[in-house]
Amino acid sequence: MRKHLMVFVVAALGAAVGFSASLYIVGQESRPVFFEYNQAPVSKVSWGGDLDSRPDFVSASITATPAVVHIKSVYAKSSQDDPFGGFFGNMPGLQPQSSGSGVIISPDGYIATNNHVVKQAESVEVILEDKRSFSAKVVGTDPTTDLALLKIDADQLPYLSFGNSDEVQVGEWVLAVGNPFNLTSTVTAGIVSAKGRSLNILNEEFAIESFLQTDAAVNPGNSGGALINTQGQLVGINTAIASETGSYAGYSFAIPANIVRKVMQDLQEFGQVQRGIIGVSIRNINSEFAESEGLKTLNGAYVTGTIAGGAAREAGIKEGDVIVRVNKTPVRSSADLQGTIGTYRPGEVVEVELMRGEEKITLPVTLRDREGKTTLGSKSSGVANPKTNVSVETVLTLSGAVLQPLSEQDKLRTGLDKGVKLARISQGRFKSAGIPEGFVVTRANKRYVESPADLASVMNQRDGSVMLEGITSDGAQKSFLIEGN
């Protein structure tokens, strides 16, 4: 990240603190109308000297503002009376609150917002543009995209339909609608200045970052609000800004609508996201790398490795391939590939076009989930994906191993982006299995492993033996069986 670039989540502003606080970061079920989006291409707006040719911001604003809501999240009391460290003096009994925005995406009260707007909230209040207030239920969350789905008990609500964010063009006019600094129903205008931005602000497993970048003014409180085109269609959810001060400094970032639509549908239908995974480690291509590897293109996602048993390897994708298209969507960068694959579910087949040397190849790839399965999960109740409470230290001490996340050097050596390194092995079950020190675990009992907690969770929940797959320090792909107790 550039020296002076700091990324702030355009988030929760304390209701009690006015302008001061921002969060730094960076039977059959009916299918609601909002799960269908307008397939018509986004219009290309030309603004010349003719006043009649200018984009119609008024009509778009009239469509959008009633469908954008103000969200207030209330949290459990902190151990101190003043949650802001004394800045506002001692305020006994105050419950911490934060403020953000949301978008109504169906007439029966489903609302899209950012996960960080409602994360760990004790209660969530939704205030409509007509000033009606509702208590909201958190249907589900997806930290990997920083999205959440809320539901209020209301009907015949104004809502926004989804546009196709793949059709959005750089230079196209867009409007940001939200509640910055508690100033409700605020509309700002700008253009799409870039697509497929990855900011590395989501510290989550399988995080997907492929933001739309705009110069529409966005500030704390805009998080979860709408980014719309001049036709009044939702093309993104405003999420972050690049700033040195915490306030708008020229660039803002939104989650593309195609990702939002897919996540919202999954959360409504299953209570958790059904994410297809291609099973590759990738990197971007620059001129120096292209020259060193003899590549004929600077666009695409370069495959540095594939995961054993993963979708890519099973389909025949190899290290050194450059993925340039998924179905009809061009892939110009790693972020493009992540964002596009993130719109598909396990079991779906995508056509992957790649360059292998000078040869262009198209392969059908059946996507899998993070456990290597091609089936969809069942509907869960409550907020999705609670993490199992396991003691990593206890599990691994009994097994005789010291585990570490992959360092940058490990990633370069192995060609892997995720995995867990067995840095030191003493007497115990790992030693008895013949596993060498430096072994990088990529899967345990066919589940992908990205952190020590992932491996500990598999071992803690095991029924008998555990099969570990991965790469040795000399680059060999091997499997080891750890016998049960």
Image (cartoon, rainbow, N blue to C red):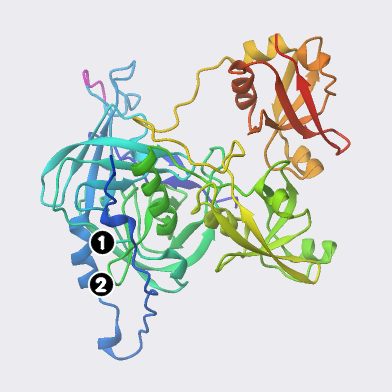
**Mark before the other along the chain sequence, 2 or 1:** 2
Closer to the camera in the image, 413 or 469:
469
* Magenta stretch, residue numbers: 89-93
Task: Check whether the beta carbons of the residues at disc 2 and disc 1 lie within 8 A of each other.
Answer: yes
Checking the image for residue 187, the label placed there is 1
Q: Please tell me whether mark 2 sits on a helix, a strand or a loop.
A: helix
Residue name at image x 82 percent, y 14 percent: 432
Please say if 150 is above or below 358. above
Residue 221 x/y as whole percent: 30, 46
Residue 102 x/y as whole percent: 28, 48
Residue name at image x 62 percent, y 18 percent: 462
Instruction: Using the rendered image of the protein, determine whether residue 368 is visible from the camera's viewpoint.
Output: yes
Residue name at image x 32 percent, y 24 percent: 83
Give the Cα distance between marks 2 and 1. 9 Å
Q: Which amino acid type is shown beneath numbered disc 2?
A: Phe
Overall secondary structure of the magenta stretch? Answer: loop
Q: Which amino acid type is shown beneath numbered disc 1?
A: Val
Checking the image for residue 223, the label placed there is none
Please say if 390 is above or below 32. above
Is residue 71 toward the left or the right of residue 134 in the image? Answer: right
Is residue 54 toward the left or the right of residue 273 in the image? Answer: left
